[in-house]
Image (cartoon, grey):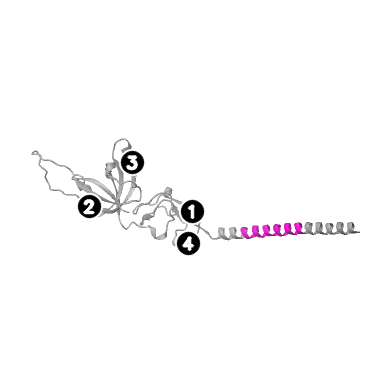
Amino acid sequence: MNEEKKNLREARQKNKLIRFQINSRIILGGTLIAISFISAYIISDTNNRMTTVWSATTDLAPGEIIEAGDVIESHVLLPNNASSYLDGSNSIVGSYVVRALGSSELIPAYALSTESGAHLRRIPISIPRSRVPTGIGSGSQIDIYGLPKDQLNSNFNLHKGLRSRALLINISVDAIDIEASKMGGDIGITILVPQELVAGFISSMTDFDFIVVKRI
């Protein structure tokens, strides 16, 4: 009799264990399903709030004209300030850069203009590598100073009385070519200069060597 009671208790405990395991699996399965639904909802809601805007593929300097390879469409989440950036569905090729942009930076609406207010001109110059600071690239803001060239008359006396001076302040680098300097040549730099300063700067080339100062 006692053996039968013992067997009955063991059978009941086994059934309880089985029911517990089944219930646990049901709860776990239900939880996973709920989590998958919630995740799907969150992903769907996030995708619905993704915005297509423009971002720069390279550093861009004020005065530059946007070309097709300078920008790319980016899908980002901008729930609060999407209106501050340029819609990726509208082309911005041909627009003028009015504020320096870094590579991969999202392009805010105020950084571009349909008109060039500064009337900038591209001027190529070459400068020894030792007179160009590291880190200079397209979009960098720089100053250019002039160092008087050693001009000697027939009596080997200095003339003209030139002194070092600032030639251009707070201008932008349009492009830079450092490949020539690797072969012992100068660094080629194309700078963006306001139209009214072009003539004066070009005339200074006969009297001055240049040194570049990078703005931080």
Residue bearing mark 3: 178
Mark count: 4
Categorize mark 4 by other alpha carbons within 10 Å: few (<14), some (14-19), many (20+): some
Query: Is tag 4's residue or tag 3's residue first in the polypeptide sequence?
Result: 4
- Name the mark nearer the viewer: 1 or 3: 3
User: Alpha-carbon distance for marks 4 and 1?
Assistant: 12 Å
Boundaries of the magenta span: 20-39
User: Alpha-carbon distance for marks 4 and 3?
Assistant: 38 Å
Residue type at tag 1: Ser
Q: Is residue 37 magenta?
A: yes
Identify the residue at image location x=73%, y=58%.
Answer: 24
User: Alpha-carbon distance for marks 3 and 2?
Assistant: 24 Å
Residues at marks 4 and 3 touching, judged by CB atoms closer than 8 Å: no
Magenta portion: prevailing SS class: helix
Estimate the x, y position of residue 67 in percent, counting from the top left: 40, 49
Residues at marks 2 and 4 touching, judged by CB atoms closer than 8 Å: no
Q: In the orientation shown, which residue stands out farthest toward the left?
A: 155
Query: Is tag 4's residue or tag 1's residue first in the polypeptide sequence?
Result: 1
Q: Secondary structure at mark 2?
A: strand
